[in-house]
Amino acid sequence: EALILVWEASDRICGKRLRPLLPILVEAMEQHGHVQLAPEVRARLLTMSAATIDRALGDVRRQAGTATRRRSAPSAAIRRSVPVRTFDDWDDPPPGFVEADLVAHSGPVTRGSFVQTLVLTDIATGWTECAPLLVREQRLLTEVLGELRKLLPFPLLGLDTDNDSVFMNETVRDYCQQVGIEFTRCRHYRKNDQAWVEQKNGAVVRRTIGYRRFEGLEGAATLARLYAAMRLFVNFFQPSFKLASKARDGALVRKRYYPPATPCQRLMADPRTSAEVRDRVRELQANLDPFHLLKEIRALQQQLVDIADKSALGETAKPTSPTLEQFLSGLRTAWREGEVRPTSVAKAKPKRLRRRPDPFAAVTVELRGWFEAEPWHTSRELLERLQIQCPGIYPNGQLRTLQRRLKEWRREAAHQLVFGTTPDPGFAHQKGKLNLRSNAANDCSGDCGGQSPVDLPLRMDDAAASPTTPQGQHQ
């Protein structure tokens, strides 16, 4: 009873932690009058080892519910109950055995909530279905999987996934058992076990959607409309290769492929495809217009780009969709424009604005006047002149800022001299910059302000423009 009382007073800690605490607890309890132990009980209590304490409290702990061992993670038990299937175990399955994977549309940052795409790829035919997931949630995944089963032209017979917790859980496992789907998984850290769906992740999803970040209902709804058109275009009008055999001769690997065929053609050519499935697929294919599907895909891709980029641009997306005639006429010359998929065009980087107040804001006009009157002066000379005029205000550490300012003014002056116009703001960053080099670059002595040849004073030819220039100075 004394041990139980001390154990409860210690907040039910283990014997190894309770053993060094016993003298302190017993003394404190007796000092404050909570308990008075007999000398022999006190002596036996203080001499108990940690193992003896744990054995003596074993029944009490079990009855109190504190001796329960921590269960292993539920996903670990689920993984053990799901059989493993490697890439070499498929052999030649009939249509209906698919691999599943998730593609994250998080952009460069994986923080927060973002839309993901569930991808199903049939092993026999290459038939691919995609659907957006608003969040990573197992019940939502089973609901989306049920909707994709309705879209598949053949019954779903098997589902092979990776070891992600969104797949390895009781909800997905029980769902597959209830509807008669064979549920398997790949090996840990062996992406080649899911080579079919991994290839479609890049060739279908990433090629169509890109790498932007999509979140919220608007992005998920637009993705759903895009996948509705894309599934028809990819499965009926996009031929793909399929590996027939692979032979290794030392370090040389020889691969042989079947002739390219669309998933629809492979499904129709498979003798295991039922007549009902053939009729349904044939009827669906007869009503499809590939040009109309491609036009719809391009328009929805542009909407996705507008949704992903509008937060960075700070404006509302205003998608524009050409008519079918305009789209068809544009296809004849689209090759001249390079990449035509809107989702493959890199997001425009926001302009880098000034991060601190301009230290020369109060004297910019005066500095500009000095430069225009005597453009041969270096930034060091201008800063020293400014320090004499305003002592203690402009330290030497601001030399680099003034150098950049003079570089911009000299660029504008050079552009005005050559072209007679003011340069565009992005002129300095264009690939075809003017290479305005002068002999003055080689003759410059002292501090040239850290400028490159293009930033040095104007050429010797415009001496007439500065008749007051002292002899011997750079012009």
Image (cartoon, rainbow, N blue to C red):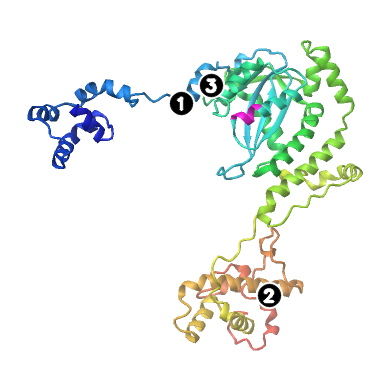
The kind of residue tagged 2 is Ala
Circle 2 crowding by C-alpha within 10 Å: few under 14, some 14–19, many from 20: many
* Amino acid type indicated by mark 1: Ala
- Residue 342 picture quarter: top right
**Residue hosting label 2:** 413
Residue identifier under label 1 = 73
First of labels 2, 1 by sequence position: 1
- The magenta-colored residue range is 138-142
Q: Is residue 248 visible?
A: no
The residue where tag 3 is placed is: 187
Which circle, 2 or 1, is nearer the viewer?
Answer: 1
Query: Outermost residue, left direction?
Result: 39
**Front residue of 156 and 386:** 156
Proximity of marks 2 and 3: CB atoms separated by less than 8 Å: no
Picture quarter with the N terminus: top left
23 sits to left or right of 454: left
Label 3 crowd (10 A; few <14 / some 14-19 / many >=20): some
Residue 175: tell me if it is visible.
Answer: yes
Which label belongs to residue 441?
none
Q: Mark 3: which secondary structure?
A: loop
Which residue sits at x=19%, y=36%? Answer: 21
Q: Secondary structure at mark 1?
A: loop
Residue type, numbered disc 3: Arg
Tell me which corner region of the image, top left, top right, bottom left or bottom right, holds residue 351: bottom right
Q: Is residue 64 above or below residue 210?
A: above
Q: Is residue 374 left or right of residue 387?
A: right
Tell me how far mark 2 sits from mark 3, CA to CA.
66 Å
